Structures are given as C-alpha cells and as structure tokens.
C-alpha cells in the first residue's frame, strides 16, 4: 500500500501487519526533522565479547524489502539484508569493550555503544529513534525511545540487523583465537557448550568478569 504522503520521497511503502513500518519515521519527519536514525544494540546477554550498536539512516526511496527484527530472520536472510542496508543507507557501528562493560555496567556500556554509533554518522542525524525504554544520557541530539522498536520501526530493524551481523563476525574471529568455547555458534551467550568450556578451559580476556557466572568461576579459582 502506497502511503498517501511522504516528505522528500515518493515510494515509501508500509510493510504488513506482521513487520515494522515507516510510521515512526514519518511522524518525526512531519515535525520538521530531516535525517532520522534508527538505533539498536546487540549483545547485552552474552558472557563474552563486546556490546555492539548500529545507527542507520534509511533512504526513504530505497528501503530494502523484508526488514524485520534481526531475531526473527534466518542467518542467510540477515546477511543478505545487511548487505542491502550497507549499499542503500547511511550506517555507523559503535561498540563498548569488555573492559567498559565491567567498569560501567552493561546498560551504560550499551548506551555508550549507541552514542558512538550515532556519532559516526556523517552527516549527523537530526533525531534518533532508540530501541528500548531509555535514551542514553550522554546523547546530545533529540531522541525518542520505542519499546520493541526493532519490531515496529524499519530504521531500528535495519540497525538491529547490522549490529547483529557485525557482532557475530567479531565473535567468529574471537572463536578462531580461543577455540573450544563455541563462540562461532553461540556468539558468547551462555550455551551448554560455552558453560562447559568455561569449566574445562577457564576464563579468557574476552569474558565479562562483572557477570555472575564468570565472577563465580574466578572467585572459586582464587579461593
């Protein structure tokens, strides 16, 4: 269904009821904002690896079809959509390291990754649509938080896809350096394989020491 109006574009389409659409973006465009970035993060739950955020400004006239919450897409579909997003949109990726996660806490580190992703866009967006119920406190531009935004906003869905692909590749690379933990499959999440490897192989420099399972292992080793 073609939208009855679109500021600065002529071919934006709403997706069906089962996927995200462009309504939130159109709402802020109608308020006078010009560059709208969707922002999402990946990697709050893993025991290892960085937390990664992406910021995406879609071209309203060239939105890749099939964008959705990255968790609802197959790995091949995510990869294909990530390439399409990179080819058609303005994209920036930011991350916060394991050391920053341990020193700040995972929420603050996630917000730091978001701020870094937004800062990497050139030109800077006028407003950011942030997945979740909180806006990073260090963000200096206008923003709106959208609960479950990756399921309702095309821009946030695009950001979720890019962030997921980027982080999975980081964890695949780390898996080659630290074999046995299954990071190429579990991306650092606490799978059975990962937890068993922690007991057999120990804690690596890429594990989050502030997370309880890692903290407990280190505490037992020290005592």
Image (cartoon, rainbow, N blue to C red):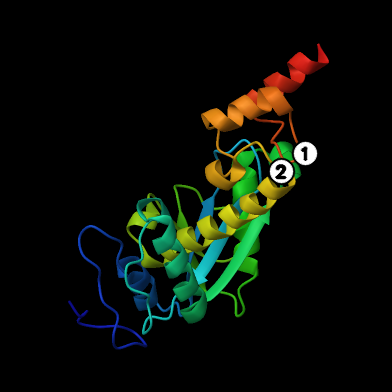
| Sequence order check, earlier mark of 1 and 2 | 2
SS label for mark 2? helix
Q: Which residue is mark 1?
A: 205
Tag in front: 1 or 2: 1
Pointer 1 with pointer 2, Cβ within 8 A: yes
Residue 86 vs 47, above or below: the answer is: below
Q: Is residue 4 left or right of residue 38?
A: left
Between 135 and 173, the one lying in front of the other is 173
Q: Is there any visible trace of residue 140 in the rendered image?
A: no
Query: In the rendered view of the protein, which quadrant contains the N terminus?
Result: bottom left
Between 91 and 78, the one lying in front of the other is 78
Q: Which residue is mark 2?
A: 98
Query: In the rendered view of the protein, which quadrant contains the C terminus?
Result: top right
Q: What is the x, y in percent for residue 112?
A: 65, 53
Instruction: Give the residue displayed 38% in from the left and 76% down from the top.
Output: 29
What is the quadrant of residue 154 in the picture? bottom left
Instruction: Give the residue displayed 51% in from the left and 63% down from the top.
Output: 162
Q: Is there any visible trace of residue 82 in the rendered image?
A: yes
Within-10-Å neighbours for mark 2: few <14, some 14–19, many 20+: many
């Amino acid at each position: 269904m073609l939208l009855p109006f679109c500021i600065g574009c002529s071919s934006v389409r709403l997706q069906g009821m089962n996927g995200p659409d462009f309504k939130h973006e159109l709402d802020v465009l109608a308020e006078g904002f010009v560059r709208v970035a969707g922002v999402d993060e990946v990697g709050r739950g893993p025991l290892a690896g960085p937390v990664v955020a992406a910021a995406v400004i879609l071209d309203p006239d060239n939105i890749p079809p099939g964008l959705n919450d990255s968790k609802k897409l197959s790995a091949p579909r995510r990869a294909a959509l990530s390439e399409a997003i990179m080819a058609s949109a303005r994209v920036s990726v930011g991350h916060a390291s394991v050391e920053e996660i341990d020193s700040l806490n995972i929420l603050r580190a996630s917000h730091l990754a978001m701020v870094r992703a937004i800062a990497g866009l050139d030109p800077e967006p006028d407003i950011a649509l942030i997945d979740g119920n909180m806006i990073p406190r260090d963000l200096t531009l206008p923003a709106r938080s959208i609960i479950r935004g990756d399921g309702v906003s095309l821009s946030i869905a695009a950001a979720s896809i890019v962030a997921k692909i980027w982080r999975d590749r980081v964890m695949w690379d780390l898996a080659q350096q630290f074999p046995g933990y299954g990071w190429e499959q579990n991306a650092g999440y606490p799978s059975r394989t990962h937890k068993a490897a922690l007991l057999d192989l120990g804690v690596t420099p890429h594990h989050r020491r502030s997370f309880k399972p890692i903290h407990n292992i280190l505490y037992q080793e020290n005592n």
